[in-house]
Amino acid sequence: MALTFVGSAAAVTQLIGQAAGLISMIVQAVETARQNKLECDHLARRVSTVHGVLSSLRDDPEAVPPLAELNNTLQEAHQLVLSCQRRSTADRFFRAGRHADTFRDLNARIISDISVLSLRLLTLIANHTGVPAVPAPGSSSGSPHTQMVLSHVSSLSSHCPRTFTWAEIAVATNDFADELGGGCLWTVYKGRLHDVPEVAVKVMDKQGRDGLEDAFVPVLVISFRLRHDHIVRLVGWCAEEDDRMLVYEHMSNGTLRDRLQRAGGGSSSSAATAPWRTRVAVLLGVSRAIQYLHCGAEPVVIHRNVSSSNILLDMNWTPRLSGFGAAVYQAAGEERGGQLVEEIVGTPGYIDPEYSRTKRVSTASDVYSFGVVMLEALTGEDPAATLQLDSIRNGKLALKDALDRRLSLDPTLPQMEALEIVADTAKRCLCLSRMGRPAMSKVVANLEEALVVIRSHEPMSMARLSLIRRRTSEN
């Protein structure tokens, strides 16, 4: 039965207009509510990572003012979230626009507060190394918080990172003539310094000005405090006008990914002519670097982007772990459950699937990524373009059938025994549940065992034999 409406044509037109207006308002309210939900999620993830910085500031009286400011901001954030929970669905729906600016403001203030606390973190590091804190050069600019951070670490001893001017880096790189590569945020140039034979200068893209400080300061804060034989050394940085640069030691043999891709290209430094012992030794060095991040660094550092492209090699194939742009501090109390992060970052093929699914990252995420690197070193295959890794992990493909056949010699029986240790360790690292993966200390122990097995069955060089005899005679 059809409904009958009585009224003038004008009334109909008016009602249609009102309905259209309400539809438009509802659509706008829905979009705003969705945006607020995203902002609220970002807020939750951001505050969950604050513990990483706070854990290094205990018993520091000068941290009281910034900590008090942070606590005020966090209290406001808590009240805002509670007020959103108490409102009815309709109230949250139609009043969402009033809270959008508040969420954005709180997120920005938390970032600002953490920047100030990072200043205290760097100050403590400088004091620990006995380096006096002096003002940075007056020409440096950027956000006030960045200037404060840099001013407290600008005068450093020879073994610590130091500041460079733009002019110094321009001279060192021959006006940025030798480009080594780059990414979406950085371009890398080769250079020379009087006290460091070769350096790699990472220059941040000024076109992507949004988020410039957010990308520059965290990697500087984390890289500054890392000291390990198998982690690439930060030589210094530049923050002058709009320029942001990081200066690292240069590794002349490229990345492990480069070497694996070029295996079979005939180069004397390629993986094709390197014995299996060399690959296992590279893996052992990197595993020790990751173990240091998880057990020796304070606070604990989660790399989040362990891949063969972030493993640099010198001419002796000594590895250095690099690529700390995505690294985060581990939040206190979230060692087992993982901590929420704003976005999933990493190299395709290496990302922990549990981290990708839940947005909760942990040290076990690095363990998974390193498991991929281990199998990549054994097979020579790009993990993003092959199904071999899953086949090996599931036991459907035997290791002997998956090994990189581009090597000049098939593995001997002792070498095969060692490679089985590596493969078994890798499969354990690739457990889909982080709770089933080994700690990096166990990975290091297994790789040490594998390297001992290989070395114990190799002919001893005259130099090594002479060294052993000399040590024996001294004892």
Image (spheres, helix red, strand yellow):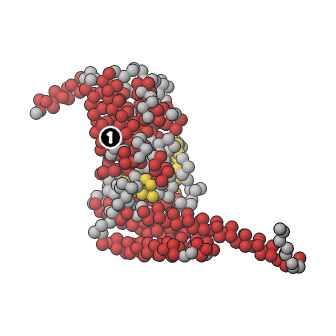
Left or right of 9, for residue 94: left
Left or right of 318, for residue 462: left
Left or right of 445, for residue 10: right
Give how far across and how far down residue 464 sits, in percent.
23, 27
Name the residue at the front extreme. 1
Relative to 66, say whether 192 is above or below. Answer: above
Front one among 264 and 52:
52
Relative to 472, say whether 164 is above or below. Answer: below
Give how far across and how far down residue 158 sits, in percent.
32, 52
Relative to 380, say whether 207 is above or below. Answer: below
Residue depicted at 55% across the width and 53% down the height: 205
Relative to 414, say whether 200 is above or below. Answer: below
The residue identified by callout 1 is 443
Residue neighbourhood size for the residue with mark 1, other residues' Cα within 10 Å, grouped as few (<14), some (14–19), many (≥20): many
Front one among 419 and 395:
395
The amino acid at mark 1 is Val
Give how far across and how far down residue 9 sits, in percent.
89, 76
**Quarter of the image with the C terminus in it:** top left
Front one among 318 and 129:
318
Quick check: can you spot residue 366?
Answer: no
Residue depicted at 87% across the width and 79% down the height: 7
